[in-house]
Image (cartoon, rainbow, N blue to C red):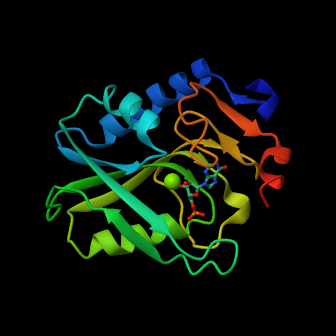
């Protein structure tokens, strides 16, 4: 499978060390508070499960699946909820857990949508940030790694539903996606 990758960008131990730091920071900021941690399916699943088990504050788990419209052609950033969360977030502290921010359209739209449900607070943590292609003005409250504009896979991230189960993050060999374009 390694012929599919240009290189490993983040090794398993680098990821886990950074997740540990993020969890410590988040736990400190929310001392004496309970949060609802919302995993954005499917990309954030591995990050989410590693992060929440290292938090030492009370956490309720929840999950959302979103699809975005308009990429490639016109990035309107319009989103559709494929699976909504189960908790009522009114007056709750919400932490959105996302895999990667690219244009920022998905996350900024999601935040606007969730604000209408009147949470006490809403913050975001993303494992990876690719600021080069940003369209929506959004900055995550917590970020694992700022990376260059490459297509990455592994540790939850996919290309055509593949590679999500890898324990590391790799840069995908461009030939892989150029073939299908
Ligand atoms: P945005 O609305 O452009 O910020 O879209 C972010 C979403 O695009 C992420 O949740 C991913 O699903 C997907 N995405 C963006 N860049 C990558 C990447 O390098 N690898 C895998 N998925 C990506
Ligand atoms: Mg995603």
Percent coordinates x, y for residue 117 in the rendering: 21, 72
User: Where's ligand 1: which quadrant?
Assistant: bottom right
Percent coordinates x, y for residue 115 in the rendering: 29, 72
Given residues 128 and 2, the one toward you in this image is 2
Given residues 178 and 84, the one toward you in this image is 178
Percent coordinates x, y for residue 82 in the rendering: 35, 64
Percent coordinates x, y for residue 44 in the rendering: 45, 43
Query: Horizontally, is 82 left or right of 12 in the view?
Result: left
Task: State the image quarter where residue 147 is shown.
Answer: top right
Is 4 placed above or below 150 here? above
- Whether residue 5 is visible here, answered yes or no, is no
- Whether residue 41 is visible here, answered yes or no, is yes
Task: State the image quarter where residue 87 is shown.
Answer: bottom left
Is 118 placed above or below 101 here? below
Q: Residue at x 57, y 42 (%)?
A: 157
Given residues 161 and 150, the one toward you in this image is 161
Badge count: 0
Quarter placement of the N terminus = top right
Is 29 placed above or below 73 here? above
Quarter placement of the C terminus = bottom right
Q: Residue at x 70, y 72 (%)?
A: 72
Query: Horizontally, is 48 left or right of 140 in the view?
Result: left
Q: Residue at x 21, y 65 (%)?
A: 119
Is 179 placed above or below 45 here? below
Q: For the view shown, which residue lies furthest in the front direction?
A: 180
Q: Residue at x 76, y 25 (%)?
A: 2
Query: Horizontally, is 171 left or right of 80 in the view?
Result: right
Query: Horizontally, is 157 left or right of 171 in the view?
Result: left
């Amino acid at each position: 499978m390694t012929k599919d990758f240009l290189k490993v960008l983040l090794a398993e131990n680098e990821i886990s060390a950074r997740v540990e730091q993020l969890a410590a920071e988040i736990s400190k900021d929310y001392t004496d508070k309970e949060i609802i941690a919302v995993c954005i399916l499917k990309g954030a699943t591995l990050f989410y499960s590693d992060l929440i088990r290292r938090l030492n504050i009370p956490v309720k788990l929840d999950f959302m699946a979103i699809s975005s419209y308009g990429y490639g052609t016109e990035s309107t950033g319009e989103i559709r909820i494929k699976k909504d969360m189960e908790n009522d977030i009114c007056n709750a502290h919400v932490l959105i857990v996302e895999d990667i921010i690219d244009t920022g359209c998905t996350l900024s739209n999601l935040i606007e949508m969730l604000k209408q449900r009147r949470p006490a607070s809403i913050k975001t943590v993303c494992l990876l940030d690719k600021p080069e292609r940003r369209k929506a003005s959004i900055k995550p409250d917590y970020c694992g790694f700022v990376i260059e504009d490459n297509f990455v896979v592994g540790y939850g991230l996919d290309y055509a539903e593949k590679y999500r189960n890898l324990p590391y993050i790799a840069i995908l060999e461009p030939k892989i996606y150029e073939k299908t374009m």
